[in-house]
Image (cartoon, rainbow, N blue to C red):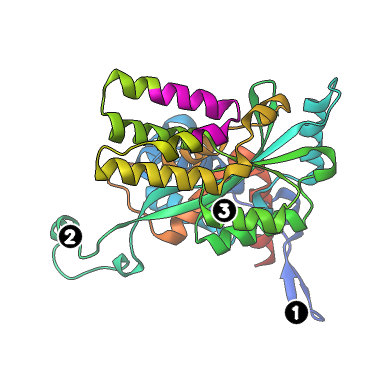
Amino acid sequence: MVGFVQLERPYFYCRTCRRGSYPFDEALNLAPGRLQLDVQQAAARVVIESPYDEAQTLFHDLTGVSMGAERMHTLTNQAAEGLTVLDVAPSRKAIEQRIAEVAAGKWRRPVVVLGLDGAYVPTRPESARGRRPGQRHQRAQRPRWKGAWRDAKGFRFYLIDEGRIVHLLSWHQVQNEADLGEALKQVKDAGLIPEDQVRLCVVCDGASWIWKHVKSLFPSARQVLDYYHCKEYLHKVAKAQYGTSEQALEWVEATLTRHYVAKLGWVLGGMKRMQATSEEAQKAISNCWDYLHDHRDRTHYRQLRRGGYAIGSGGIESSNKFICHVRLKRSGAWWYELNSNQMLALRCAKYNGTFDRVFERHQRRLREA
């Protein structure tokens, strides 16, 4: 804001370790180049909320500092390079403090919910990198690559406090289920979630890969099948069997009531006795019966509600929306997998409250280099 400033400072070199340093730079936390870390961090905060071209204009209007979109892209990716779940996760002390605030004045331990799910994001292949022959406007009009929608799998830990959610930890990446399981294992091994101070509850849909990791890492956690996924299955049965008639509404409301009060045996028995009116209805009934029967031990909703546990996966669904969809699912946006994961890591750091710590890590890496 005051223009260029020229600094003269001594340089020291160690002949033994053959390394040099500028102590004055370290005292002032100076970074190589014209843009210092506070400016880079401010730019990253704008970039993780809006597209690069829009962020460039907004950043200049707010600060008076000019920074190109390409420069913003480079600096943001450098700060996010190599981030892992432990780099963006809050410390155990910070998590315990949030748990203590929720537990204050209550006679039983608070409930911590773990949700796991995936969110589709638009990606482009690595072959799309580099310049292609031909005029620039023709390259833009006729790309030779085809985009694909990839699953950004993630998990979220959060507290339930009288109907509101207190966020603890989120991690989302474009990854397979093995990578997600490894990240969850790192959180478990680091002891970030004090399981002896809370009642752990896992709320997910019926995906088998999710429950595989849950049983392996958190065998004592209360397992809950998302109630609203069950509703979707039952509504499909009602539509296939009765169409849009009043009978369909009556059947689905009565069945949902039985399911809500943990009368799953009645629900399964009623579906078993149903006479399908079409092949489509038979398929819907069969799929719904298998789904509910396979997860019958995870549908004790009456007891779960009495215990203060969650029965819906809205916490992880909202995490998918605010971390993944808001930034990555933009009109015309197609992401390289590496860039999308770096952006997701920074957004997780923001919601986890560790954004400043990420840039302290970036500063140490620059100093070591």
Q: What residue does disc 2 label?
A: 136
Q: Is residue 97 above or below residue 22?
A: above
Whether residue 10 is in magenta: the answer is: no
Residue interval drawn in magenta? 251-267
x, y (%) of residue 203? 60, 40
Q: Is residue 122 above or below residue 14?
A: above
Whether residue 264 is in magenta: the answer is: yes
Disc nearer the start of the sequence (2/3): 2
- Disc 2 residue type? Arg
Mark 2 or 1: in front is 2
Mark 2 or 3: in front is 3
Q: CA distance from mark 2 to mark 3?
A: 45 Å
Q: Residue at x 69, y 59 (%)?
A: 216
Q: Residue at x 43, y 54 (%)?
A: 151
x, y (%) of residue 285? 38, 41
Tell me if mark 1 has few (under 14), some (14-19) or many (20+) residues whose alpha carbon lies within 10 angstroms of its own.
few
Q: CA distance from mark 3 to mark 1?
A: 51 Å
Whether residue 33 is visible to the viewer of this picture, yes or no, is no
Residue 316 falls in image quadrant: top right
Residue 18 numbered tag = 1
Whether residue 255 is visible to the viewer of this picture, yes or no, is yes
Disc nearer the start of the sequence (3/1): 1
Q: Secondary structure at mark 3?
A: helix
For the C terminus, the quadrant is bottom right
x, y (%) of residue 286? 39, 46
Q: What residue does disc 3 label?
A: 210
Q: Residue at x 57, y 53 (%)?
A: 210
- Helix, strand or loop for the magenta stretch, by majority: helix
Nearer-the-camera pick, 305 or 38: 305
Nearer-the-camera pick, 227 or 187: 227
- Disc 1 residue type? Arg
x, y (%) of residue 8? 67, 56
